[in-house]
Image (spheres, rainbow, N blue to C red):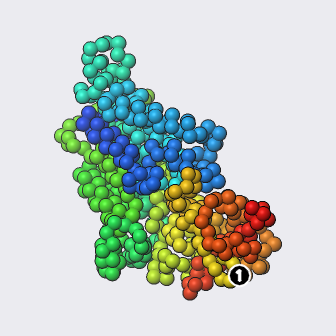
Amino acid sequence: MSNHSDDFNQKLVAFWCDDLPPMNDGLRILFYGGLLLIAVFAPVVRPHLGDSPLQAPELYSYTLPEFFTMEGCMKAFGKTWMTNKRLRLIRSVCMIAWIGCIIGVGGIWSPIVVSICMLMLHGVVVGCVGTNHRWYAPVYTMLALALSNGNGVYSVDHYFSSRYNSYPFSKLNNPALFTSGFGRKVTLVSVIMTLFFGGITKMLNSGLKWMDGSTIGYYVNEENKGRWPWLKIWISKCQPLLVFLSVKTMILELSSPCALFVPFFRPILLVSASIFHFGIWLTLHPNYLPQTWCYILCTNYHESMKYHTPVNLVTLTASWGISVFLAFSIVCALMGMENWPFTSIPMYSYYRDASYSHMYLKNTKQARCVSHECINSGGYPIGWSSKWIYLWLSDSAGNLFELDDLIVQNRAERGVLLKQWVRMKNRIAARDIMAKSDLELLNFDSCKSKQHPAQTWLIEYANIWRLQNWSLPAWTNHEDVKLQFGVRLKNNSSIALAFTSWMTKRNRED
């Protein structure tokens, strides 16, 4: 029994530590240097403040407290420690350690510090911008590389350790785990799991019908998304191509775990995934360059070389630990968990056909269906259009003035980013719709006496918006003006979820 156990442990350590070569100077400089540039220049891709962990201080400073949310495991840390000054300090420490990783100084401590700082800053960013899936894989990669020392002959550490025996960051002092391929194998697992979880979630939320092309056609048809409008139009008009892309996407995502066991399949998968991400950027807007950059660590550039990491307490603990964590992550994905830092990659996973429009919902049945999807996804309005839910000022004369553009305007010193605002209003709408009966949805007067989620939320947030120095039409100063929150339906009809007076007694006195 002991021999079988020892043999299994040896194979487990070899799977995690010897499958890919250790980190080397070239990959270290290329990966850390390239990802730093991508992170620093994120505001160019996601104006006006960016969305990388390095923009956490600016994002937190800009976001009004009422719009900042503690997501997932961040709730365990609370908000008391979170100040702009501390976030800037964490970023400064992260940047110093990151540069240390590039030039190869600090031994194992530089990547450890970078990984901890990136995880903390990413948690803050998620609370400011909502889901931030394009940075999950890079953060996971940083955590994986915390157990990898790639400081070879082209590093500051090597220069000093070769001249001074007492140099504290000599690579010779590292445990075998840190000089193995463990960090790169965990990176491979993390990027593959983001692909695989996406496929699992599509199957769980939509089943095989996701591959009929309708869902991709729906999302590609959305205006103001993607870089090549002509490509969007061409794809959306070609049903066989939509079916092909849908089937190809599902095959790519569900077959991705094969790359863990078949090295020959890795370059094929990673190149295909890179093309896949590029196509998403051209037609659907999300930019997965940060994740794509991590792919450079995930293939073996020296096929003929063999590695043998010793089985000891450190390597065995790390191998078992990451195996258990991987199993737990798969269970979370099967449960559809979207709880930072865990994700099931739920984007585009819910089925959409020709009955759905980006401008409105068809009827109360469809509104209840998408609300159920949102509640089922842990409160994340996956697949919701930003146009479905309205917030406007109205009066008895039939005047309407929408407030979305003013709420997310970038000219304000503080406010809320569009992505976070859309997620918040959609989430509230979903909760409210699920809390009401069909009669209450169709007749607002029937539930006036009850405090449903949307009504409570609207009254609270109306006090914030009344204080804003907005340029509003003159008619909004009248006493009969109402702030209305609801759902757009077909044929210019709507479901009113909540009302409140816009002009309070204090406003009139001012």
When asked about the image quadrant of residue 100, the answer is top left
Can I make out residue 61 in this image? yes
- Percent x, y of residue 183: 36, 38
At a point 26% along the width and 49% down the height, the residue shown is 263
When asked about the image quadrant of residue 278, the answer is bottom left
Kind of residue sitting beneath label 1:
Ser
Q: Nearer the viewer, residue 378 or 320?
A: 378
Can I make out residue 14 in this image? no
- The residue where tag 1 is placed is 396
For the C terminus, give its image quadrant: bottom right
Q: Nearer the viewer, residue 116 or 486?
A: 486
- Residue 264 relative to residue 180: left or right: left
Q: Residues within 10 Å of mark 1 (few under 14, many from 20)?
A: few
Q: Nearer the viewer, residue 404 or 10?
A: 404
Total marks in image: 1
- Percent x, y of residue 254: 38, 61
